[in-house]
Image (cartoon, rainbow, N blue to C red):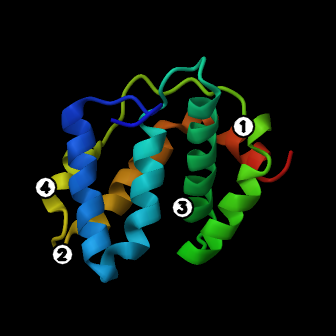
Amino acid sequence: MHAYMTSSPGCWAAFGRVLAAEYSMPHLMPTHQLSVDTYAAQHPGDPADRRAVQSVGLHLARLWRQLECPTPPMETNDIMRGFAARKAGLPYLPPPARFTMTVADVAPFAGTAQHGERVLAWARATWQDWRGAHAAITAWAEGG
């Protein structure tokens, strides 16, 4: 299990299957950051744990960049490093009551021709599920 992203063992195992496919199939690596950011955004952990609060904020900020301001994966890594330098300013963001899509909807397609499109749909659904936090994340990500 992860230190601060709480999940069930089954959920963590499903995420592991998605990651294993991405690491073992180079053509899937462009979707890897979306997978990581989406999973992290859906597992906010304990709001009293600063690491969890910062994790959600950083991963939502990178989802915003990838989905709203499309940026190549290597550039989003650089952007994420810049975001991380300012992570102390991330506020706690109350998570959505539920998520439209989860890793359980993606794992059966891990490594298949549908892998990338399923990850993208999962990422888009999760970003939309967090719509109540869009203004806060966008303002923070833009330095406001």
Amino acid type at circle 2 is Ala
Q: Residue furthest right?
A: 144
Amino acid type at circle 3 is Leu
What residue do we see at 22% from left, 33% from top?
Answer: 9
Count residues near mark 3 (Cα–Cα under 10 Å), then give few for <14, some for 14-19, many for 20+.
some
Across and down, in percent, residue 52 comes to 56, 31
In-front residue for pair 40/96? 40
Q: Which part of the image, by quadrant, shows the N terminus?
A: top left
Q: Residues under labels 1 and 2: Cα distance?
A: 35 Å
Q: Residues under labels 3 and 4: Cα distance?
A: 23 Å
Residue that badge 1 annotates: 136
Q: Which mark is residue 67?
A: 3
Residue that badge 2 annotates: 113
Q: Secondary structure at mark 4?
A: helix
Q: Which mark is residue 29?
A: none
Residue that badge 4 annotates: 108
Earlier-in-chain disc, 3 versus 2: 3
- The mark lying in front, picked from 3 and 2, is 2
Left or right of residue 70: residue 137:
right
